[in-house]
Image (cartoon, rainbow, N blue to C red):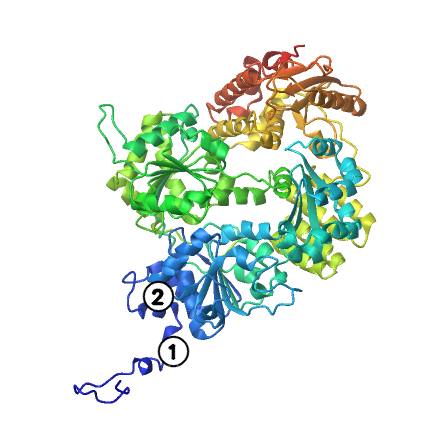
Amino acid sequence: MTPPGQMREDGAVALDWDRIGTGDSEALLRPRDIYAGLASRPWPYLRHEQGEVLDKWFERRGDSDVVIKQNTGGGKTAVGLLIAQSTLNEGIGKAVYLTPDNYLVKQVREEAVRLSVATTDDPYDPAFLSAQAVLVTNYQKLLNGKSAFGVVGDGKEPIELGVVVVDDAHAALARTEDQFRLRVPAGHDAYDKLLELFALDLRHQSANAWAELEDKDPTALAPIPFWAWADKREEVLKILRPYREERTFMFGWPLLAEVMHLCTATATSAAIEIRPSCPPIDRIPSFVRARRRVYLTATLADDSALVTDFGADPALVARPVTPGSAADLGERMILAPVALNPDLDDEAVRVLARQFADGDQDGDGVAETEPVNVVVLVPSDRAAVNWSPYAHHIWRVGDLEGGVKKLQTGHVGLVVLVNKYDGVNLPAGACRLLILDGVPRPLDGVERREAVALADSTVRLAREVQRIEQGMGRGVRDGEDYCAVLLLGAKLATAIHEARHLTLFSPATQAQLKLSRDIAGQIKGEGLDAVRQALRACLGRVPQWRERSRRALAEVRYAEHGTVRGEAVALREAFDLAATGRTPAAAERVQKAVNALGDGDRALRGWLREQKAAYLHLTDSVAAQQALAGALNDNAFVLRPVNGGAPVQLKAAAVQSRAAAEFLGAQYRDGTGLRLGVQTLFEDVVWGEEERSDDAERAWQQLGLHLGFASTRPEKQYGTGPDNLWALSAARQAVVELKTGCTTNTIAKKDMDQLGGSVRWLNDHNPEVEALPVMLHPSQVCDTRATAVPGMRVVTPSLFEKLKEAVTSYASALASSPDRWTDEQAVRDQLAHHKLTSDRLFTTYSEPLRA
């Protein structure tokens, strides 16, 4: 071999390439320059938007937390990998790139190959440990109680990191919260022991909820009072500690053991769930000590969760890095058929979707458009069943890798994806028509309780909108891509119609929704053919649509400042104070957030005041109970104090029609909103699904308000009494139990006993009014072992359908001209016409019990 620099026998000089071009490493620190220096680039140039955010990040690379926002399909993966490579080149330390799941780990590593970025998926790989390769792994690998990176107290030396890139930050939040919780499953010895330990506390808090737990009712939900949980912390630890190495607990125990007394515990028939108000992220030193943390996000309009879940610096989170323009989003036409015409049912839309998958045809059977891939996102297997007659494939998470590749390489047809609203890339022809048929509902106990307590809060609304926007982003992956989007059902239609929802979408999506509303305005009231023609304009690349679509986005800019809610910052700071023993200061910090809220969001105020009371209890139990009593004034669904809260007597409206007109006027700004609102109520009452009971109870309460009745949920508010109570008049109240989840052909003894107990409850608390016992049940027949409640009425599915038709017609008539729903006389006429008055409603839409 000829030594480098010496002449070879053929007269040529042997060059030492290792000594050429290595003198100036500064040139390869900037991510844009790293890309430009690649010998083989996957694209001639970085996209303009990618270059912009990379340059801005480089100027701010000294910040510990940086949020990078780009529209879906804006090339965030390449951005994150180049940032990781830049950090390695700078010698700052090791680089980790986190994704939601292993499916996406594979995708990121494939992208890294194209960018010549060395990666590994093994945290013990010498190339990663020597900062020569980027570790690409899922969130759980870093954030768990047995983390290979080290956990406080495990004796391991934490791995020092230079940068952690968190991809799909919105998805990371849910995964992180899941890691920082302990779930004690029913049937486990610890479950029974904990239930026995807190039996009296649970029974005192809610006799009904305790009875449901004993019956193993799948809808049972019983929060363990914070004072009982804190006072019995030693017993809790004694019960749980022996099982800490079991697989069920081993990944959560090391993260929660030290803050167990600060956790919220909720009992359901499936498990006892233990969760802190904020993840104790400092238990993972590698993450919190990383020199740089970069969060890549498309749909996180509200950035508060980055503070509460990851402990990110709120001041830095509020300064996101974005491209100069938000016009890099692909074309989308977004329509909600039910908002265009309430008579368009979902089944007709499913037929239409299949026609586009097969090649949309005109009346002569001639294809108007080529067959396209249609992708439907549904939240559950039960929702997928509705699509089975029309779908070519129904895929779940395990099917995604192979399935998505099929979509990306050719025509597949109509595909249903079950509960996968993020982390799926469907570029170009992989998805031309995207349909959202519902969004995932809260499943665990804590989230179900939050859904009840914060139902009307903007905080809860923001989460729902985020999931919707995530789902809608699956079908466009760059500025040249295009996709039509249909939203099924009144709830999703409301999200793109009501002003409260619209402001929570990203700026680019808001611009596309505005353009889509212009189209919707022209085809409003028309049939399915009008929807078909609109979709053809998008899918058929009609020049006028393309031009207007691009123009709609041309001047859109990202929000200059991120949204970081004050109460979210307070909750994080308060938890950190409490975790270090400074609970009085924690309570004071939450109170400052309550004061700052004012009277704007009373549901949230009450929720925060409950948290303040939990911190207070650790040093002053009397003050804690006083604070909790105050929380009840703001939110009727928080915990009840030790002394209980005396039920407030429900007073009937003086005039039903006036009360209805006032409620409708405050609730709806236009007729479309009114019609969608009423349809949403009936969508939430699902027969045969026990897990939808909470939705049904809330819908029934809201239905009462829409009709002008004072309406409450005593069982949720006081832990006893009926599911719902309607004040029909000064002398008569409907005591309502909803058993919409039942599938039996008779009314069981326990259900009949519950209704009888609720009648007695009303007689005890308001003896001056007559109780009308009402039950929503699939059967009007009393079981032979049950004792009938005198005078009871039953709303069966068929009668409920009649009620739905009447209320829908009532709303449609009032929505037919501007502000008619605020006119007391018009409301009175419609209530009477549809037999919805206090004296006729239950005689018309329910029937007597049959023996």
Q: Taking the image as drawn, is residue 324 in sight? A: no
Residue highlighted by disc 2: 116
Q: Amino acid at mark 1?
A: Ser
Query: What residue does disc 1 label?
Result: 25
The C terminus, quarter of image: top right
In primary-sequence order, the first of circles 1 and 2 is 1
Instruction: Out of 681 and 525, give the one closest to the viewer.
Output: 681
Which residue is drawn at the image coordinates 35% and 70% (left, top)? 33
Image quadrant occupied by the N terminus? bottom left
Q: Choose between 382 and 683: the one closer to the eye.
A: 382
In this rendering, is residue 495 above or below 5? above
Picture layout, residue 806 above or below residue 711? above
Instruction: Tell me the SS state at disc 2.
Output: loop
Question: In the shown orientation, is residue 796 left or right of residue 545?
Answer: right
Residue 402, x across and y down, in percent: 38, 46
Residue at mark 1 to residue at mark 2: CA–CA distance: 17 Å
Between label 1 and label 2, give the one nearer the viewer.
Answer: 2
**Residue 661 percent coordinates (x, y):** 58, 25
The picture places residue 745, in percent across and down from the top left corner, at 61, 17
Q: Residue at x 56, y 27 (%)?
A: 685
User: From what the image shows, is residue 486 above or below residue 592?
Assistant: above
